[in-house]
Amino acid sequence: MLFRRLCAEFAGVFLIVFTSGVSGGEPFAVCGAIWCGQGISGLCSGAHFNPAVTIALLYDKYLNKKVSKIDVTDALLYIVTQFIAALFSALCAWGIVHHNMFFDALDDYSIAQAFWAELIFTMLICANAVMMGKMWHIDKVVFNAAIVLTVFGSISTVGHITNGCFNPAIGLGVNIYYYIKHGTHFENTWIFIIAPSLGGIIGALFTNFFTVEMRKRNIIK
């Protein structure tokens, strides 16, 4: 049922954004929230929890000529739900902690460096999500672990450059309330919307490069 799937997306995004905001983006906390969100929702919605992942999965269906109007409608509703959940959750985090986190080009890193860091690692996260969804023989625990470890590795690698967003809904939600409270770090928010979205599209393209061979071996569906 679509309503339950949207509720699952709302709950997962809420948990991730709230944890990110309160913990300051601490990798173990964020990845634990993702795994918890996957668990409590039972992967009811596919556990996208990220507009970039939703875009990647929809584009993958388009590339394989399997996309329908219902798929497009569902994807749009997923994305709207993810953004609403992120805004509401960021507000709750904003009301609890004194020192809110933000996403931006940190230290001496340039906007271009921040953009590429977000794009490349969102691409990896989305490619992994798309491929794990195709591999019918993969246990759900392995699926969950693969996604969580990819996110953990991404935050650990480039978190010092951007604070590790990789999610347009989180980037917008967190930065809006940081700006309301402190009046700074909003002008580069576009990076955390555009770069992850492009990363999702490229991730789907990257994954499809390998699928022809894998279908021959009956490794994927």
Image: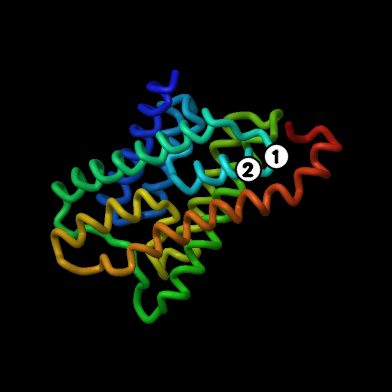
Residue type at mark 2: give it.
Answer: Asp
Residue occupying the point 41% across, 68% down: 160
CA neighbours of label 2 inside 10 A, class few (<14), some (14 to 19), many (20+): many
Is residue 146 visible from the viewing direction of this image? no
Residue pictured at 51% horizontal, 31% vertical: 46
Residue behind mark 2: 60
Q: How busy is the neighbourhood of tag 1: few (under 14 within 10 Å), some, or many (20 plus)?
A: few
Pick whichever, 73 or 196, lies toward us: 73
Direction top: furthest residue? 1
Rendered image coloring scheme = rainbow
Q: Quarter of the image containing the N terminus?
A: top left
Q: CA distance from mark 1 to mark 2?
A: 6 Å
Q: Nearer the viewer, residue 45 or 32?
A: 45
Residue 114 position (above or below residue 34): below
- Give the image quarter of residue 108: bottom left
Point out which mark residue 64 bears: 1
Q: Is residue 53 left or right of residue 192?
A: right
Q: Secondary structure at mark 2?
A: helix
Where residue 182 is drawn, which disc sits there?
A: none
The answer to whether marks 1 and 2 mark residues whose Cβ atoms lie closer than 8 Å is: yes
Q: Whole-percent x and y of residue 147?
A: 54, 44
Q: Position of residue 118 (x, y in %)?
A: 47, 62
Nearest to the observer: residue 210 or residue 159: 210
Residue found at the far bottom of this picture: 108
